[in-house]
Amino acid sequence: AQKITQTQPGMFVQEKEAVTLDCTYDTSDPSYGLFWYKQPSSGEMIFLIYQGSYDQQNATEGRYSLNFQKARKSANLVISASQLGDSAMYFCAMRSGAGSYQLTFGKGTKLSVIP
Amino acid sequence: EPEVTQTPSHQVTQMGQEVILRCVPISNHLYFYWYRQILGQKVEFLVSFYNNEISEKSEIFDDQFSVERPDGSNFTLKIRSTKLEDSAMYFCASSEEFSGGNIQYFGAGTRLSVL
């Protein structure tokens, strides 16, 4: 069975600082994908970044990067130069299993950016 | 930028009534999904739909749920006889043919309140 664990229910970061949100995963499938989504207080789910299990390099998208450590089964999200608008819930998710596209989500981390 | 559109944003219904939640996926996407998020909990997969049929469904997606793509642009989720525990945020998502991770883009959600 697939499982995503986010152990930080809440995190605080000073504006302009970097922050790392933790995510560990469990799957027996060699082919999988890892995703991060942002959910602001307004409720929508916004795709941030994707990492494939066979990708050699860590994914980056602007201020977001994914620290992918395959042996440790971790896929931490790093947000650089935090902004007030980064305050939101952040969900790690995984797709795995041949022919399966469903996403399994973690419980999320609530990030608060302090001015 | 193309986006997934969901209507209504909030639906209030009486227990036992039928509701239909509507979604317009991104126009060139071929895979469609419904997820739900009970307040304060993680996002859960309900069903995926491809080529006019269900491709995967979770154990949550029982006989009271059904999905349909009635006209080539809309994608609907019907809950036949709502229960109090169906109160949740329902998200529609869509993705392209599998490439680059099959990234799912979510709508803003419909908040369903069952009284």
Image (cartoon, grey):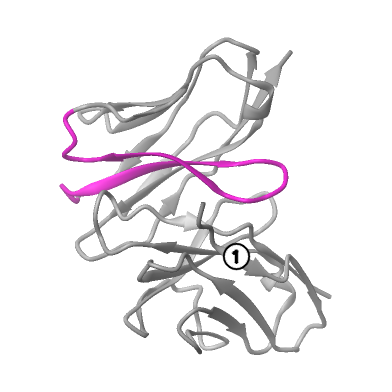
User: Residue A50 occupies which quadrant of the picture?
Assistant: top left
Q: Position of residue A21 (x, y in %)?
A: 49, 26
Magenta highlight on residue A45: yes
In the image, residue A27 sits, relative to residue A82, either above or below, namely below
User: Residue A87 occupies which quadrant of the picture?
Assistant: top right
In the image, residue A15 sits, relative to residue A43, either above or below, namely above
Which chain is disc 1 placed on?
Answer: B
**Amino acid carrying mark 1 in the image:** Thr
User: Residue A38 occupies which quadrant of the picture?
Assistant: top right
Does residue B11 appear left or right of residue B45 in this picture?
right
Q: For the point 64% across and 89% down, which residue is it?
A: B80
Q: For the point 24% across and 55% down, which residue is it?
A: B99
The one nearer the camera, A56 or A106, is A56
Q: Which residues make up the magenta segment?
A: A29-56
For the view shown, which residue lies furthest in the front direction? B1
Quadrant placement of the C terminus of chain A: top right
For the question of whether residue A27 can be seen, the reply is no
The one nearer the camera, A52 or B113, is A52
Q: Position of residue A72 (x, y in %)?
A: 26, 27
Q: For the point 58% across and 18% down, which residue is it?
A: A82
Q: For the point 44% across and 64% down, which residue is it?
A: B94
Kindly identify which residue carries mark 1: B5
Q: Secondary structure at mark 1?
A: strand
